Amino acid sequence: MAYAYDPQNIFARILRGEIPNSTVLETEHTLAFRDIFPKAPQHVLVIPKGAYVTYDHFFGQASEAEIVDFARTVAKVCEMVGATADAGAMGSRAITNAGEHGVQEVPHFHLHILAGRPLGRMLDMAEAE
Ligand code: DGP
């Protein structure tokens, strides 16, 4: 599959240090930072440092080191911001939007981690715009 990556997208610019961000955690292959328009008390975006457009691009073509690093960073961020769902915890939601139907605004793969309030049902056919 061919994915066209736009190196001028806003997250690429954040990764190059051209735009500031509120970093939660940074590792060799992954950056987690706060969403600029939070939809919940905790709203963190986790992105790979590599040039991947969507989750299918990343999980299909990234190296195992990048994928493991990304997954472990997600788990660490969940612990750091109280987004776990272990005994006694209130849980969270992880979302990744892809392409036009997914209403992806920034074309660099990112996982939204939302927590800190009840998040409602995931999807409703009647809500489709
Ligand atoms: P999506 O629709 O899944 O592509 O969501 C993109 C998210 O990125 C959206 O929740 C707002 C966030 N965002 C856009 N620009 C910036 C930025 O410059 N900094 C940060 N921290 N977040 C941004």
Image: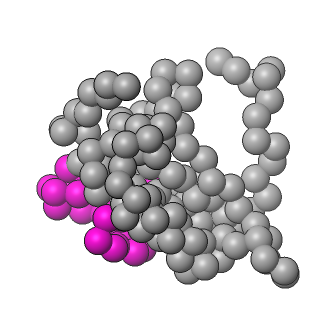
Nearer to the camera, 99 or 118: 99
Residue 23: say if magenta: yes
Q: Residue at x 42, y 68 (%)?
A: 69
> Measuring 40% from the left and 75% from the top, which residue is drawn there?
25
Q: In this orientation, does residue 37 appear?
A: no
From this view, report whether residue 24 is shown above or below residue 113. below
In this picture, residue 6 sits left or right of residue 55: left
The residue under the point 56% across, 22% down is: 101
106 relative to 83, above or below: above
Please say if 100 is above or below 112: above
Whole-percent x and y of residue 71? 51, 64
* Image-based side of 127 in relation to 98, left or right: right
Measured as percent of width and height from the top left, residue 24 is found at: 42, 73
Q: In the image, residue 106 lies at what x, y percent?
A: 37, 38
How many marks can you see? 0
Span highlighted in magenta in the image: 13-35
Q: Is residue 43 magenta?
A: no
Left or right placement of residue 125 versus residue 17 in this view: right
Q: In the orientation shown, which residue stands out farthest toward the front?
A: 64
Q: Locate residue 2: give its quadrant.
A: top left
Give x and y (percent) for residue 67: 43, 58
Q: Please report the residue visible at 20 percent of the width from the left and 50 percent of the height from the top.
A: 13
| Image quadrant where one finds the C terminus | top right
Left of 54 or right of it: where is 7?
left
Q: Is residue 27 positioned above or below 12 on the image? A: below
Q: Quadrant of the N terminus?
A: top left
